[in-house]
Image (cartoon, rainbow, N blue to C red):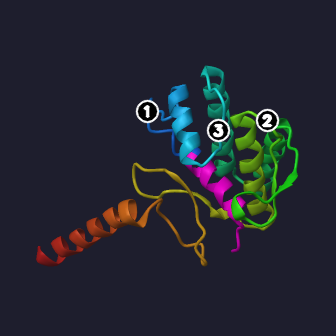
Amino acid sequence: MLINHDTRCALDAVVRLLNTEGPGDDDGLATPADLRRYATSCGFRDPGPLGAADVAAVRSVRERFARVFAAPDTASAAALLNAMVAEAGTTPRLSDHDGYDWHVHYFAPGASLADHLAADGGMALAFLVVAGERERLRRCEAPGCGRAFVDVSRNRSRRYCSSRTCGNRLHVAAYRARRRETAG
């Protein structure tokens, strides 16, 4: 599956946003400083001053993205994305910044960080839906994890958010269980 640079960046920002929500009350977007760290980690250019209202708006976008990942079918995911992208005031425009070829940004100039995420992230997810690739939007299958990821493997076989952490932990546990079984 071919994904251009900006779509990949938008998908990565969606995944990072979803993964700021930890279990229980552990929220990686509790303060404007948290939001600024998130924005910087995603490569957003100066998002301007960020306050409590921005945190609440981005957390709302995060919840909407979570509903897209959990949507029971494509029609439901499409309805969620259509609403989100429309409400963000999508304004497609061509750009060739940072040495990348011409591509389309969907957020309006001067848009808030929440609208920027909803527009660009929503459109990136919409491209997957249109391509018939919605099943690539996944949650880690490791017990107790549930982190979001986009499976970009050729055969859509990725099961864990990270093969180094969750995948390796489960493989080692299975290996040890087999060893105990043969030893006992």
Indicate which disc residue 110 carries: 2
Which stretch is magenta? 1-16
Q: What residue type is labelled 3?
A: Asp
How many other residues sit within 10 Å of disc 1, few (<14), some (14-19) or many (≥20)? Answer: few
Image quarter in which the N terminus is found = bottom right
Judging depth in this view, the residue of 101 and 5 nearest the camera is: 101
Q: In this view, does 181 lie above or below 49?
A: below
Q: Is residue 163 above or below residue 118?
A: below
Left or right of residue 70, residue 77 in this image: right
Left or right of residue 30, residue 53 in this image: right
Please tell me whether residue 19 belongs to the stretch shown in magenta.
Answer: no
Indicate which disc residue 26 carries: 1
Q: Are marks 1 and 3 in contact (CB under 8 Å)?
A: no
Q: Name the residue under label 3.
A: 46
Q: Looking at the image, which residue is at 60% across and 78% down?
A: 155
Q: Looking at the image, which residue is at 56% across and 43% down?
A: 40
Q: How far apart are marks 2 and 3 (CA)?
A: 11 Å
- In primary-sequence order, the first of circles 2 and 3 is 3
Question: Residue 141: where, in percent of width, then height?
Answer: 47, 58
Looking at the rendered structure, the secondary structure element under dot 2 is loop
Q: How far apart are marks 1 and 2 (CA)?
A: 31 Å
Mark whose residue sits in front, 1 or 2: 2
Quadrant in which residue 9 is drawn = bottom right
Question: Residue 153: where, in percent of width, then height?
Answer: 58, 73
The kind of secondary structure the magenta stretch mainly shows is helix
Q: Looking at the image, which residue is at 52% across and 26% down?
A: 31
